[in-house]
Image (cartoon, rainbow, N blue to C red):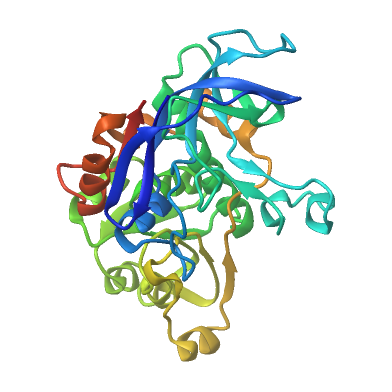
């Protein structure tokens, strides 16, 4: 079968891989759609999300929608469209027992090097427990986007957002746009969006933000210098946390969901200390797929708004280039193997 292997930064090659054979409690699925995530872009542009790099070619892609090809248990009907949870925690460690499988230090994550191949291939096998059937009207792109929506849900949970609080979302990419929608539905009295790309800020306003701008100073102007109660940071830059700390009020809360280029964060300790900010980082998500499906099915979150481009497997490199350049109105590309 065909698969897209990432050998290093800017080096993606189409190749062949043996069709997988499902093991006990596994299901063979045909991949129908893979959303390109910010972490995929880090591998493409920077060669990794941290110092480990890419030690061997691997198949990226962890936002996966697929249709059931073979389920020997008969519990999933052939052809059923499912969202694939890419995380495989051990189920035995302290954190798994505490219902925090996203923090499992032994977990395997699809689409991460060197050997954990992801969705940019024609078929894969996944544990039955990791497959979530979606409503009949879901497209493959919408089903694939549920993984990112799950991260957004977890981010809002960590923020402990109370009704009537004010919120700024820093970074109006796909994750940030989902956070704008969720913050509004969680009862925020005001939601602001910041992004250096002006049209992305306008998109945030279309999806529920009250105002958008490109720098921290506008939020301070809108709030008469006070800042906001909660800041949700969803950028891919080391400086995103600095902007978040500048727009947070004294005693406010910041939740950092973005993955920065270079694997390091950059912010002023003086600002954070003097404001006594509470800072929370996000590590993937726990078991939230059912909630994500319910929100999307009820129209509480518009997933289609962030799905802007579709490419075949053969044009994955072009899709990565486009999404990294933030041109042509791109938010998220979906690859259809």
Front residue of this view, candidates 251 and 21: 21
Vertical order, 243 against 104 (above or below): below
Residue 165 at x, y = what percent? 53, 58
Which image quarter is the C terminus in?
Answer: top left
Q: Residue furthest left?
A: 328
Residue 16 vs residue 212, the one in the foreground:
16
**Picture mark count:** 0
Q: Which residue is drawn at 62% across and 43% down?
A: 87
Between residues 284 and 279, which one lies in front from this camera angle? 284
Quadrant in which the N terminus appears = top left
Is 269 positioned to the left or the right of 154 in the image? left
Residue at 71% over, 55% down: 106
From this viewpoint, is residue 108 visible?
yes
Instruction: Name above or below for residue 287 compared with residue 159.
Output: above
Q: Is residue 190 above or below residue 130?
A: below
Answer with left or right where residue 324 lies relative to residue 226.
left
Expressed as whole percent of the image width and height from the top left, the position of residue 232 reads: 47, 60
Which quadrant of the figure has residue 311? top left
Determine if residue 300 is in view: no
In percent of width and height, residue 189 lies at 47, 52
* Image position of 242 with respect to 305: above or below: below
- Residue 200 placed where, x, y %? 25, 50
Foreground residue among 210 and 142: 142
Q: Give the residue drawn at x 55%, y 43%.
A: 110
């Amino acid at each position: 079968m065909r698969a897209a292997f990432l050998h290093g930064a800017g080096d993606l090659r189409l190749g062949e891989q043996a069709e997988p054979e499902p093991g006990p409690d596994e299901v063979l699925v045909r991949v129908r759609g893979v959303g390109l995530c910010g972490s995929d872009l880090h591998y493409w542009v920077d060669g990794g999300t941290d110092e480990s790099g890419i030690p061997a070619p691997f198949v990226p892609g962890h936002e996966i929608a697929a249709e059931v090809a073979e389920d020997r248990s008969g519990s999933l009907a052939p052809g059923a469209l499912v969202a694939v949870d890419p995380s495989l925690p051990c189920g035995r460690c302290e954190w798994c027992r505490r219902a925090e499988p996203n923090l499992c230090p032994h977990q395997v994550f699809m689409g991460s090097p060197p050997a954990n191949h992801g969705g940019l291939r024609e078929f894969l096998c996944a544990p039955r427990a990791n497959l979530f059937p979606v409503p009949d009207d879901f497209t493959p792109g919408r089903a694939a986007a549920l993984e990112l929506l799950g991260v957004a849900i977890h981010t809002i949970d960590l923020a402990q957002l109370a009704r009537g609080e004010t919120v700024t979302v820093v970074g109006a990419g796909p994750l940030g746009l989902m956070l704008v929608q969720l913050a509004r539905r969680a009862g925020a009295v005001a939601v602001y969006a910041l992004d250096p790309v002006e049209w992305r800020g306008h998109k945030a306003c279309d999806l529920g933000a009250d105002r958008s701008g490109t720098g921290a100073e506008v939020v301070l102007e809108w709030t008469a210098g006070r800042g906001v109660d909660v800041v949700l940071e969803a950028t891919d830059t080391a400086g995103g946390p600095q902007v978040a700390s500048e727009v947070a009020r004294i005693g406010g809360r910041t939740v950092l969901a973005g993955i920065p280029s270079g694997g390091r964060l950059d912010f002023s300790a003086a600002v954070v200390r003097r404001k006594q900010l509470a800072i929370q980082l996000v590590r993937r998500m726990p078991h939230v797929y059912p909630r994500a499906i319910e929100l999307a099915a009820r129209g509480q979150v518009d997933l289609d708004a962030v799905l802007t481009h579709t490419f075949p497997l053969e044009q994955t490199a072009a899709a990565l280039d486009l999404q990294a350049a933030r041109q042509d109105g791109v938010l998220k590309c979906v690859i259809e193997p």
